[in-house]
Image: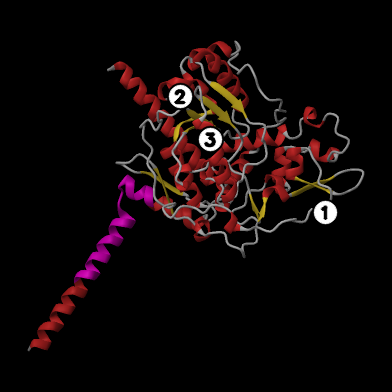
């Protein structure tokens, strides 16, 4: 009798399980709920296109942040001594006319040839020499209008290339005279990635500089974020400007080919390289324009400047790098502006960092020309034809983590501006 009783219990449990599964199937496949329909379509899209890293993005109802899901496993892997990846500076782009030796991307950026270069890597990656991603790098990050500024006299602008940095430098120069602070623009342009020992050395220099300050100080430089607290040092204030990722890449592509960069240079790439368009570069699959998720090179991305010098921060599509970049932005940066709306960006900087940016919005309006363009721009060549829509979508898919980071920064700035306007109206 007891055996019969247990058998009935198991049969009842099995029947209930089947009923629940059947109801779930009916609800999932037949439901007309917009939420269910949207999730079903997103899952279908992900199954069809696995290369779209973080292809599903949903806005958390209570936290207002972009949540990344369904990413391929490789995007969270770490780089170790056996990883066969090279720094982007080693990408061989073109042969010069006289000697038929390779120009690498690093040499074109610096307009300087190596003593000996055959396009092969000269150094091997040594991941242990560089910082590591934090253990909490996969923690979902929320943005908020909270003012992260601290009452310290040091502000660092680790500027992203091709993101209105020349305009920002001019604004800061004028504001330094108005607001009585010092401004030092670094003459170090290419030391962006730093080893752990180099970061420690940089932090010691920062601390010594702070101790000897007579007035507030702003410094700028192209380099990747350094977490001072991780080394036991006190925080400083950070700012930056970001831009639509593909627009930034196109701008840099044509800037590198501008004739003024190559004046008085006896050695230069072939004319074919100078005449190349961004469309042609993508259509022909040339490495200069390739940002494949499974690529062999570590590429300098926009989010790299916020993620740091961990090698994973330069790995296309790495979700851990994306989350660390968003975390650093929210925790350490007072303001990250948007190039397409510098006026709003400066208004927020003025509210959050008044010691440095009081009068910034008014100054920027005066500095604009009648047609709305900033008064000072780096020389560049506008693309002859717009980027093909299919090529744009393909590149945007590969740069999905870049766009998720850009959207995170944009929404945070909008939230900060909304908070300022609300406070002014109260």
Residue 224 located within the stretch drawn in magenta: no
Residue beneath the point at 42% across and 51% down: 41
* Coloration mode: secondary structure
- Which residue is disc 2 drawn over? 349
Q: What range is drawn magenta here?
A: 16-39
Q: Position of residue 261 (x, y in %)?
A: 77, 30
In the image, residue 228 sits, relative to residue 310, either above or below, namely above
Q: Main secondary structure of the magenta part?
A: helix
Residue 32 located within the stretch drawn in magenta: yes
Q: Earlier in the sequence, mark 3 or mark 1?
A: 1
* 187 relative to 366 in the view: left or right: right
For the residues marked 1 and 2, what is the alpha-carbon distance in whole angstroms? 47 Å
* 169 relative to 180 in the view: left or right: right
Q: Secondary structure at mark 3?
A: helix
* 175 relative to 94 in the view: left or right: left
- Which residue is disc 1 drawn over? 118
Q: Secondary structure at mark 1?
A: loop
Residue beneath the point at 18% across and 74% down: 13
Question: Where does the C terminus fall, quadrant-wise?
Answer: top left
Q: Earlier in the sequence, mark 1 or mark 2?
A: 1
């Amino acid at each position: 009798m007891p055996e019969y009783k247990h058998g009935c219990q198991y049969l009842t449990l099995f029947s209930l399980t089947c009923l629940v599964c059947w109801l779930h199937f009916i609800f999932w496949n037949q439901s007309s709920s917009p939420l269910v329909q949207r999730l079903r379509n997103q899952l279908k899209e992900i199954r069809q296109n696995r290369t779209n890293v973080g292809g599903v993005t949903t806005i958390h109802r209570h936290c207002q942040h972009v949540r990344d899901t369904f990413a391929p496993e490789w995007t969270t892997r770490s780089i170790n001594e056996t990883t066969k990846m090279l720094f982007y500076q080693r990408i061989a782009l073109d042969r010069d006319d006289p000697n038929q030796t390779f120009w690498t991307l690093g040499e074109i950026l610096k307009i300087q040839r190596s003593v000996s270069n055959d396009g092969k890597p000269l150094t091997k990656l040594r991941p242990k020499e560089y910082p590591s991603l934090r253990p909490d790098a996969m923690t979902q990050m929320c943005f908020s209008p909270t003012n992260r500024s601290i009452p310290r006299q040091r502000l660092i602008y680790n500027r992203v290339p091709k993101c209105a940095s020349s305009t920002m430098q001019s604004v800061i120069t004028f504001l330094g005279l108005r607001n009585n602070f010092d401004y030092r623009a670094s003459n170090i342009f290419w030391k962006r990635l730093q080893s752990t020992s180099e970061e420690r050395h940089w932090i010691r220099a920062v601390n010594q500089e702070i101790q000897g300050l007579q007035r507030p100080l702003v410094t700028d430089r192209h380099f990747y974020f350094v977490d001072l607290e991780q080394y036991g040092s006190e925080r400083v204030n950070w700012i930056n400007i970001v831009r639509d990722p593909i627009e930034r890449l196109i701008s840099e592509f044509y800037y590198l080919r501008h004739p003024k960069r190559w004046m008085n240079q006896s050695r230069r790439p072939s004319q074919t390289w100078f005449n190349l368009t961004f469309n042609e570069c993508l259509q022909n699959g040339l490495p200069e324009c390739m940002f494949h998720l499974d690529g062999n090179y570590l590429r300098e991305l926009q989010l790299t400047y916020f993620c740091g010098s961990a090698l994973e921060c330069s790995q296309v599509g790495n979700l851990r790098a994306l989350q660390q970049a968003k975390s650093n932005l929210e925790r350490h940066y007072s303001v990250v502006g948007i190039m397409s709306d510098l006026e709003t960006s400066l208004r927020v900087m003025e509210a959050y960092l008044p010691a440095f940016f009081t009068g910034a919005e008014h100054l920027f309006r005066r500095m604009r020309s009648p047609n709305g363009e900033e008064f000072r721009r780096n020389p560049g060549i506008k693309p002859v034809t717009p980027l093909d829509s299919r090529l744009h979508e393909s590149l945007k898919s590969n740069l999905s983590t870049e766009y998720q980071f850009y959207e995170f920064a944009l929404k945070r700035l909008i939230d900060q501006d909304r908070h300022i306007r609300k406070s002014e109206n109260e």
